[in-house]
Image (cartoon, helix red, strand yellow):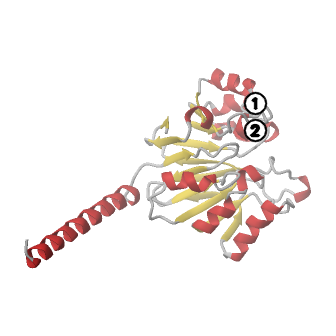
Amino acid sequence: MNYRARSLTLFISIVVLCCTTMYGLAMHWHTTRSPQRMTVTMLDIGQGDALYVRFGDGSDMLIDASPDRSVLTELAEVMPWWDRTIDTLILTHPDSDHIAGAHAVMQQYTIGRIFDCGLRDKHTETVKRVYDDIREQDISLQSVYAGDQFDIPSGEQIHILSPKALVPQSEKDSNSCSLVFTISDQNATVLFTGDAPAEIEEQLVTRDSTILDVDVLKVAHHGSNTSSVQSFLDAVTPSIALISVGEHNSYHHPHPSVISRLKKTGAQIFSTVDDGRVRCVSTGEMFECRGE
C-alpha cells in the first residue's frame, strides 16, 4: 500500500472513530440530561449514609456523604463520567459517618448548594474541616427547617418535615437535628430520615401523620432500635425500606426488632449488606428497586 492510500485509510479510521465517539457521547448526554424519571440510589459505603438522587431534568442531589472517601468510588459508578457537578448536597446532621466524606466530595466535584440542619458547632475536626471547605469554596449554605419546600424544574418536590425552625442550639443533639424530608415525583414519594430518633418520629406522627404515608422509607439510624417505632411505621406504611449499614458493624445494626417491625408493615427490605448498591426508579406512581 502506497503512502497516499495509507494516509487515506488512516484518515477514514480517525473520522469513523470520532463519529462513533461523538455519537456515544450524544446518546449518553441524551439519556442523562433529557427528561427521565427520578432515581434514588442508596450507595454501598459501609457503616454510614450516602444516597444519590437524579431528577427528571438531569439535575442531582447527594444526601449525606459517607464516613470516608468510599463515596467517591460509588459516585463514579452512578454519575456520568463527564459530570463533575453535584447541584445540591444535603448534610442531614454532623455525625462523621454521614458528613466526613463531604471533604473528599468537595475536592472532586463542584457543589451548587448545601442544605443542613443548622447544627454547626459540634466541635470535631471532621465537622470543622467540612465547614472550612464550604467557606473556602464559597458554596451557598442554607439551613432548612420544617415547612420549607423546594421545587425541581422537572416537577419533583422536596418537603422538609424536621427539625422545627429556631430550635436553640443548646437543645439540639446531632441525631435529633437530622433533616427529615420527602421527595415526591407525582404520586411516588421517598422519606429520608437521617438518624432521627424515636422522639422525632413520634413528634412527626402527632403533628400530621398523613404527610408520612410514602412508598419508600430510608430507615433511620441504620436500623438502630432507637428509631423506627411502630407508630411511625404504621403512619409511613412503606412498600420498600432501605437500610444503609456496614457488614459486621460494632453497633449490631440493623436491630432484629426493627427488621421485625418493618416486616410487620409488609415492606420489602433492602440493605447494603445484603443487596449492595440499591437503585430505585420512580414510575410516577411507585418506585421499583433492585440491588446492583
Q: Earlier in the sequence, mark 1 or mark 2?
A: 2
What residue is shown at x 58% (from left), y 66% (from top)? 108
Residue 21 in the image: state x and y as whole percent.
Answer: 29, 64
Q: Quadrant of residue 141?
A: bottom right
What residue is shown at x 67% (from left), y 51% (from top)? 66
Q: Where does the N terminus fall, quadrant-wise?
A: bottom left
Q: Quadrant of residue 221?
A: top right
Q: Amino acid at mark 1?
A: Val
What residue is shown at x 79% (from left), y 61% (from top)? 127
Q: Which residue is mark 2?
A: 201
9 relative to 175 in the view: left or right:
left
Check residue 229 in the rendering and tell me which mark sits there, or answer none.
Answer: 1
- Asked which secondary structure carries label 2, the reply is helix
**Contact check, label 1 and label 2, Cβ < 8 Å:** yes
Nearer to us in this view, 274 or 199: 274
Residue 189 in the image: state x and y as whole percent.
Answer: 55, 42
> Which residue is farthest right?
170
Residue 85 in the image: state x and y as whole percent.
Answer: 53, 66
Check residue 168 in the rendering and tell me which mark sits there, or answer none.
Answer: none
Q: Amino acid at mark 2?
A: Glu
217 over 132 or under it: above or below? above
163 relative to 269 in the view: left or right:
right
> From where the camera sits, is residue 214 visible?
no
Nearer to us in this view, 201 or 29: 29
